[in-house]
Image: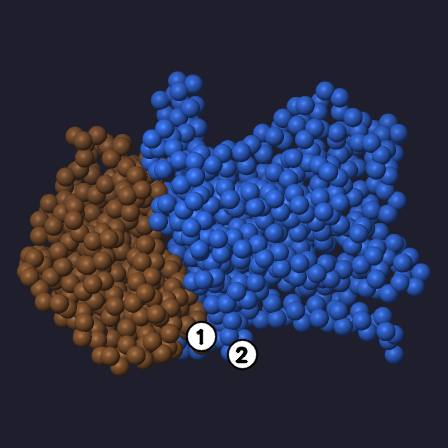
Chain colours: A blue, B brown
Amino acid sequence: MPGRTEWAKLGVLGGLLAATALLVVYPLGRLAVESLRGPGGWTLAHYVELLRDPELRQVLWNTLWIAGATTAGSAVIGVFMGWAVARTDMPLRGAVRTLSALTLASPSFLGALAWVLLLGPRAGKLNRLLMEWLGLDRAPFDIFSPWGIVFVLTLFSYPLVFLPVAAALDGMDASLEDASRLLGAGRLRTTLEITLPLVLPAILSGAILVFVEAMVIFGPVAVLGVPVQFHTLATKMLTMMRFPPRLELAAVMTLPVVLTLAGLLALQRLWLGRRRFTVTTGQASRRGLPALGWGRYPLAAACLAVVGLAVFLPYGTLLMVSLQKSLGRPLSPENFTLLDNYRYLFDQSAAVRALWHSLWLSAAAVLAALALGLLAAWLVERARARGRGLLALLMLAPFALPGAALGVALVLAFGGRPFALAGTLTILWLAYVVRSLPVTFAYARGALTQLSPDLEEAARTLGGTWLRSLRDVTVPLIRHGLLAAAVIQFVLLFRELGTSVFLYTGGNEVTAVVIYDFAQEAQFTLVAAFSVIVAAVNLGVVTLVRRSVGLDRWA
Amino acid sequence: MRRIAAIRAVTALFALSLAPHPAAGAGLPPELVAAAKREGTVVIYTGGHTREQITELAKRFEQEYGIKVQATRKPTGDILQMLAAEQKAGAVRADVISVADVAALGYLRQEGLIEKYLPPNADQVVESLMEPGGDSVPFTLNVLGIAYNKAKVPADKTPKAWKDLTDPFFKGKVAHGNPATSGTTAGFVNAVTRIAGWELYQKLGAGGMLIQDSATALAQLVITGEALVALPGVEPNVLDAQKRGEPLAMIYPAEGVPVNAYYVSLARGAKNPNAARLFVAFHIADETQRHLNDRLASRAVLKHVAPPAGLPRVTDVKLVAPDFAWLAKNRKQMLETFQGYLRK
């Protein structure tokens, strides 16, 4: 008969499996059933329709190469910057980290809009400047193009690689690198052959998230691609299901993405195989970081350039717009207003309510998802149980759903009896938990693969219960990874639009929905002002969390 | 023939709009008002109000009857998706549903999401705006013209007729709604091609148009200067933007201008059926209609209420309503023709 510890363990893990079934399997199942039903009963007709679509090939190809290019770009930038902030003595390391989290802080359609203002082929401010300086008679950049989409998506996605890679490098024992250096390897060789391979799990799980996200993202493609007839799977299918509403297509479009995701996970497993990446042994020597000498300045400049493109330019643009009375006239004394837009927002009960809702819904969802994600990661990495590949797929599957599809799934699953959650804040919270599982799981797992199981075993040998060893040993040792997950996910939820816009009802607004609503009415000065407020709130929360968890002041 | 008849009918009815009028809109049964007050709440899902319209109407309704309005406003397409999902889950919460076009109304009817309710004064609504299903009422009229950026289009280039848009000056600078996703745009394309012929789109398409899924989102491209004109220019949106100082303006070509209306319907199986009826009736009550006109510059639908001050009188322009019966049969073919003219 199992002892008390074992019972506790079974209980906790049983709870995890039940939660996964309820939150992931059940809604996705409802969606799948929906896609297999027609007027005359069971049918594959909806899938056949997709396969027969004459544009399908083109659209799939568009989707895959946009996702591939975005992933490549994000991986290069993310790994490079991760190394720079965690493994060098570059100045402004902490600022680069905090600000990078901010890139995720606005709905992605808004980032795309800001770039239209900057790089629009006819009136983009940056294009205009370049034309003037270089004496060109045509705009050098056209943001309404596939490369424009890749550019914006990359700037929006690189933190998904950068933050976990930096976190993994933080937790790494420097002695391996020292050994390599002692054996005569140069700095570059050490980095390429020792440091980077050791954080391969973090790089891969980040890259997979970027790839899948880029496949299903709607906003930037709708803003930058659709006007010039460039479609990906998300815009194509969401357009098709719009009128008349065809909910079954939500599942149909998800299928290719889920298959891709399963393929990527299989590849990841094959690649990482039985290699071990244990670098956190609890005996980390975090002696001084290697001094780069004068090289640290160009390095900082490169990182700041990325942050500048991802944060300063778009938010600077939004800040400027938020101080204008109207967007269509240039910023001049008559068109300037310091507070009008902000005052208007604070007079709108919906806007204030939305901020409050987003704050607590996001925080509560991140906490729940962090617990579930960590347990699932532990089960997958440590328990060596059968079916752990499936559990991993289930935890990541919500990422493969476009926002609207997840919204449909949740209403079908929880809208009616016995749950009767349609139109409540609870269903939004559930949606946010489900949305958060992939990131929290992937990052917790990435961190666990680096942690030597010896430590947990030692704790248990010393008489600690399973839960206690998890709480007192495992969690503190991988806190960098968990914190990175929490921060990213919080910021991501704050901007979540696709699912929220489907689930919210009057009185239950969240921030992204309010921004979307203003944008629908072309009230861009208000859109800009609200985004500035949202960014400020995010910046405050991220800074607060980083400090209170006791990370180095600026690192 | 039928088209010309439709044009004449609308024009004639607007001529009537100047006739003196009796006080209308009253005459709601007191039992209805009492029962509605007991329910105390009404839930509306709307794709057919601007934010200003729904905010203002809800506020006034609450003031007048003490009945709370819980409003969810999204684009019509999103409203339909949400309703479809709630219906599948057996959890439709709306008491009143409002949409921006007749095709959406057809969907609601076909899916059994609405039931017939016409307020007592529905006979004073301009007949041609009443939709063919006969179970819902329009409450405001949208003129769909050309929206343009006044700051960037010089006076001598300002279009007066639809064909002026094919001037090389506008090449690649026309933003157009997507008729496949926007019901307003679908009706617009139907009406415009009846006024100016498909040659218009043949030429505009060859010049390269920027396409946006939602008709209301077009303004962003014109305000920022990425496009110079938007089709359709939705009058209430353009006026809203103007009020905020944006350099947007409307053009009403003399050959004819499309119109559409926003509709309100009673949801089938509404949990607050009396409050729902009262709220629908409130939309076309005389006083509300005047308020829409005078305060929100939204055109009224009652025959005897003159258009908002400062707007061209609809008697001066030829208004063309979409041919809903034709659209119901030929929508797909129309979308394909439109798509075919777009430059790849």
Residue denoted by label 1 = B91
List x then y, in percent, for residue B205: 26, 43
Q: Which residue: 5% across, 60% down?
A: B19
Q: Tags 1 and 2 in contact by the CB under 8 Å rule?
A: no
User: What amino acid is at disc 1?
Assistant: Ala
Q: Foreground: A113 or A319?
A: A319
Q: Which residue: 50% across, 67% down?
A: A424
Q: Is residue B178 above or below residue A427?
A: above
Numbered circle sitting on residue A418:
2
List x then y, in percent, for residue B201: 22, 45
Q: Foreground: A385 or B16?
A: B16
Determine crowd level at label 1: few under 14, some 14-19, many 20+ residues with C-alpha closer than 10 A: many
Residue at the outermost bottom position: B31
Q: Is residue B158 above or below residue A419?
A: above
Q: Is residue B152 above or below residue B244?
A: above
Query: The disc numbered 1 marks a residue on which chain?
Result: B
Q: Foreground: B61 or B47?
A: B61
